Amino acid sequence: AHLEAALREDSSDLESTQLLGLAYYLMGHLPKAMPLLERVQSAVARPDVTGSYILGITYLQSREYDKSRAAFAKMFAVAADSPNAHLVLGQMMLRQEFDEQAIPELKRALELDPRLPMAHFLLGEIYLFRSKTDAALEEFRKELEFNPILWLVYWRMGDAYTRLEKWREAEQALKQAIWLNQNFTGPFILMGKVQMKKGSPDLAAGFLERALKMDPNNYLARYLLGQA
C-alpha cells in the first residue's frame, strides 16, 4: 500500500516501481507485476541481472515464452533469437519444472547450432528424469562429441547405466567423472551402489566414506554405507 501511494505521488519513481513490481511478483500477482518490471528494465541503460531474471520468470510463468527468452537473453547479453538464448530459456524452464516446454527450446537451439555445448546434456537430463534411459544416453554421447571433459555427462551416464543394471559401463563412466572432478559426491555415491551390486562391499564403503567426508549429512550415502 505504501509503494502504491508513492507511485500515485510520483509515477516516475523507478525505485518504488521496482519494489512494487517485486512485491506483486512475490505475492503471485503476475499481471500486476509485469508492467512495472517492464518499465524498470526499459528505463535502465544496462541490463539489471536481478530485474531481468525476475521479469523472465514472470513471463515464463505467464506462458509468454518469446518474451521470457528475450528477458533472459538481455540478462546474459546474448541476442534474443540466438541459439544461446534458446539454451538459456531451456535451462530456466528446467529450473521452473517446465520440462515439456524445455524440449522444443533445446531442439531449436541445436537446429541453429548443432555443436552448441550443454544442449544435448540438458535434453539427456530431461529424458533421464522421464525414465527414457536409452534416449538420455544417446544425448549424453552426442554431448561428449563436442565436450569430452564435461564430468557432469559421465556422472549422468553412470546413473543411466545403473538404471539399466549395466554395472561395467556404469563403473567406467563414473570413474571418468571422478577423475575429472573429485569434489562432488554424486559419482562416489553411485560408485558405492555399483560396487555393492558387483559384490564388493569393501570397495563400496571406501567410495561412500569419501562422499560423506564431503557431505556428512547426505542421507543416501549413509544408508548405502550402512548396507555395505
Image (cartoon, rainbow, N blue to C red):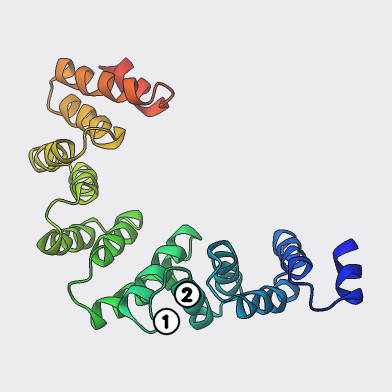
The secondary structure type at the circle numbered 1 is loop
The residue lying at 35 percent from left, 58 percent from top is 130
Quarter of the C terminus within the rendering: top left
Q: Residues within 10 Å of mark 1 (few under 14, many from 20)?
A: some
Identify the amino acid type marked 2: Lys
Q: Which mark is residue 161?
A: none
* Up/down of 219 relative to 102, above or below: above
Q: Earlier in the sequence, mark 2 or mark 1?
A: 2
Q: Residue at x 35, y 70 (%)?
A: 87
Quadrant assignment for the N terminus:
bottom right
Among the 4 quarters of the image, the one containing residue 34: bottom right
Q: Secondary structure at mark 2?
A: helix
Query: Residue placed at 76% from the left, 70% from the top?
Result: 17
The residue where tag 1 is placed is 80
Q: Nearer the viewer, residue 72 or 184?
A: 72
| Horizontal and vertical percent position of residue 147 | 15, 59
Residue behind mark 2? 74
Quadrant in which residue 101 is drawn = bottom left
- 4 or 112, nearer to the observer: 4
| Circles 2 and 1: CB atoms closer than 8 Å | yes
